[in-house]
Image (spheres, rainbow, N blue to C red):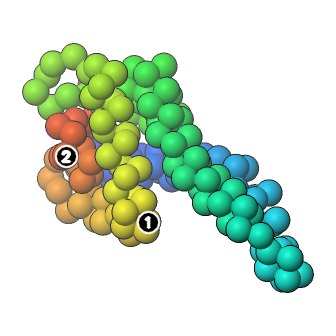
Amino acid sequence: MRESNFKLNRVLASLVDGLIMFLITAGICTAPAIIFFKGLINNNFIIADLFWLLFSIFGSFAVWILYLFISALLFKGSTLGMKFYRLTFIRTNGTELRAMNIFFREATMVICIILSLGFSVIFDFLSMLCNDSGKNFYDIFSSTKVVTIDE
């Protein structure tokens, strides 16, 4: 596979996974957000509504990690988006990919997204496009690389 197609497939796979994570967050946070803002507008806001909203937001981050971890475990190194575009990630040193490696990689990605308020997604795409090996930040950090399933 040509390098430009490989990088395009990585971007598209990330977008598919990002859409899935957005839908997860929307599903978890919609009701608490409606109740919270409805309370603010009607002047009957209670602090429990804020805590429920914050709990649902942080809960959705945990569900992101679980989604990425479980799908990568089930598909042997591929998330749903990566599976669709025939990509998988492996260890750069050639050793077997273990559950702890998968969890570390996916948790690193989610934590970077949270701590950077989403800006790490842009930097990850730029680092992937500018890097000869096509690695994102969390690939470098977790000693993994993405390859096509054909390899």
Disc number at residue 136? none
Q: Is residue 125 visible?
A: no
All told, the count of numbered labels is 2
Q: Secondary structure at mark 1?
A: loop
Nearest the camera: 23 or 61? 61
Residue closer to the observer: 79 or 111: 111
Asked whether, in this view, residue 35 is left or right of residue 132, the answer is right
SS type, badge 2:
helix
In this rendered view, identify the residue nearer to me: 118 or 55: 55
Residue 46 appears left or right of 58: right
Comes first in the chain, label 2 or label 1: 1
User: Residue at coordinates 71% horizontally, 68% vertically from top-left?
Assistant: 47
Residue highlighted by disc 1: 118
Q: What amino acid does circle 1 point to?
A: Gly
Confirm or deny contact between disc 2 and disc 1 (CB under 8 A).
no
Left or right of 103, for residue 138: left
Q: Quadrant of the N terminus?
A: top left
Return the x and y of residue 86 as percentages of the image width and height: 43, 31
Residue at 20%, 28% in the rendered image: 91
* Crowd rating for badge 1 (residues with CA inside 10 Å; few <14, some 14–19, many 20+): few
Residue 140 appears in the picture as rendered: yes
| Above or below 74: residue 55 | below
Q: Residue furthest right?
A: 42
Q: Position of residue 8 (x, y in %)?
A: 39, 52
On residue 141, the disc is 2
Distance from the alpha carbon under mark 2 to that under mark 1: 18 Å
- Vertical placement of 70 versus 1: above or below? above
Residue 93's spot in the image, x, y percent? 10, 27
Seen at 74% across and 63% down, the residue is 49
Amino acid bearing label 2 = Phe
Can you give x and y, in whole percent of width and height, for residue 94 in the image?
A: 14, 22
At 37% from the left and 42% from the top, the residue drawn is 107
